[in-house]
Image (cartoon, rainbow, N blue to C red):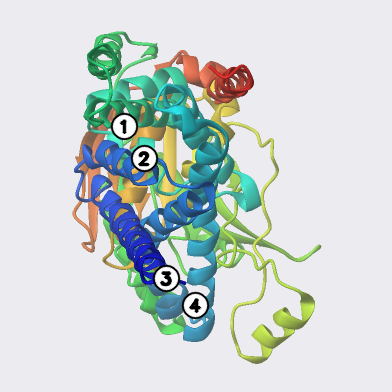
Amino acid sequence: MSVSARGADAALQLQTRWRLAAAFCTGAALNVAFAPFGWWPLAVLAPAALFALIRSLPPRRAGWTGAAFGAGLFAFGTYWLYTCLHVFGLVPIWLTLVLQAALIALMSIYSAALCYLANRFWLKAGATRAWLVLPVLWVLLEWLRGWALSGFPWLSLGYAMIDSPLKGWAPLFGVYGVTWAVVTIAVAVNVSLVPAVPTARRLMAVGAIALLFLIPTLLGRYHWTRVAGPALPIAAVQGAVSQDQKWQANNLEATMTRYSQLTAEAWGARLIVWPEAALPVLANDIPDYLRRLQELGRAHGADFAIGLVSYQPTPKQYHNGLLVLSDAGGGWYFKRHLVPFGEYFPVPAFVRSWMRLMSLPYDDITAGGEHQPTLSAAGQKLGLTICYEDAFGSQQLQILRDATLLINVTNNAWYGDSTAPHQHLQIARMRALEAGRYLVRAANDGITAAIGPHGEIVARLPQFQKAVLRAEVQPMTGLTPYARLGNYPVVVCAGLLLAIAVRRRRQGV
């Protein structure tokens, strides 16, 4: 090899490393667009920077660049899994690191596939097809990530826009519709900054950006849902019991007393909500406590929605449940969408045996039925979700035809003082916006909040403080376009546009 050839090869390797480092840093920076930081313009600029980095790259190098972007996003975006798995879950540190690395690698495949496919099949001829291909691929892969292998929709791009004008797309097309608008704007920004782009195309890009911001702003004035009765006084109890202390046997009585005392501060509310697994005991073991609580509720005109673990001996089953104590329409709701390695262990029998020998948790929570009866309390039909379930908006669509109020209970104590509780609240806000409903959210140590039908926070409690949130929420009825049709319009439209892009490529357009 000649000196000049070796020099060119070294320069290429240096450029490749630079692009990978830049892509990793861009993905890491995208985290700042999400809560608690909320710098939503970065949700546009980071994809635009990624598209600039892969411009004119061979497909394989574009794929590696996309993988670096995904690694940066999820390495910094899911760091709190260490606290959840190792600190509180007692998973050995080596296994925790293996699971985290596996998740980051798996999530990076999506952005790698995006960049590889775009450069392999469409983007060689210039920027024209980017208007179709990049947003379509991003949305389809994000949608796939939301359900494949149990689904991991965390850090979906649309959630970062909950406080931006683009959130107005959510009642029409859901969070993936918001993502589509964001990526289209990112393409437009990218196109407008390419020096060789003709002026007409540059003006078209600027016009597209303006329309994508203007249309949802105007549509935001329209109310898809309507009031269904007088305002309802509610209370959400935040016990703030530390996760490392919660399940110790000597703390049971103190925890039960704490929730009883906090509930006494909530009288006057028609509906009182306790967080997920509020008491460190099986519901079957405290029938007298629950009966007294319901009697007190009747005396004060209050119904309850309480997060508890239920046990069924034959067949042996544990359920993560929400018990509604109401004389009209009460009963159990059992969590349907469980968390891998948190509530069930998708591992072979020999691994489960090892977990038993190591005194690690090894029993699975059993998922609730896909179709469960709608429960009622305080004169309202309740749309109930437990913890991570509220990250799956399409799974809640059926209940929205009846529900006048949404309830989510969670235990974010697993995540400690990290970004996760703030991002989980952001996800809950998107669900309220998509549904056009008020949502009451009770969390063990935060973030407990009441959320309005436009995704706005009506009231909230500070984290890590035992307190009672009191607010008035408005029962709502009617359906937004998203509540009627779910993700079908976005996915079908994306598929059709991808087919158009394939046809145009074959025609050489």
Q: Which amino acid does label 1 sit on?
A: Ala
The outermost residue toward the bottom is: 357
Q: Is residue 299 above or below residue 280?
A: above
**Camera sees residue 422:** yes
Please tell me which residue is depicted at 78% across the width and 77% down the height of the picture.
349
Look at the picture and state if 275 lies above or below 390. below
- Pointer 3 residue: 2
Q: Nearer the viewer, residue 505 or 240?
A: 505
Q: How many residues crowd around disc 2 within 10 Å: few (fewer than 14), some, or many (20 or more)? A: many
Residue marked by disc 2: 51
Determine whether label 1 and label 2 are within 8 Å by CB: yes
| Relative to 195, 408 lies left or right | right
User: Mark 4 near mark 2, Cβ–Cβ under 8 Å?
Assistant: no
**SS state under label 1:** helix
Q: Percent x, y for residue 400?
A: 52, 24
Q: Can residue 436 be seen in this view?
A: no
Q: Residue at x 48, y 77 (%)?
A: 97
Q: Real-space Cα distance between discs 3 and 2?
A: 34 Å
Query: According to the image, label 4 marks what residue?
Result: 96
Q: Name the residue under label 1.
A: 186
- Alpha carbon separation for disc pair 1 and 3: 42 Å
Q: Which amino acid does label 4 sit on?
A: Thr
Identify the amino acid type marked 2: Phe
Image x and y of residue 44, in percent:
28, 36
* Residue 363 drawn at (x, y percent): 67, 72
Specify the quadrant of the image occupied by residue 498: top right
- Residue that appears at 76% across and 66% down: 316
Q: Residue 5 carries which label?
A: none
- Where residue 506 sits: x, y (%)? 64, 21
Q: How far apart are marks 1 and 2 (CA)?
A: 8 Å
How many numbered marks appear? 4
- N-terminal of the pair, mark 1 or mark 2, is 2
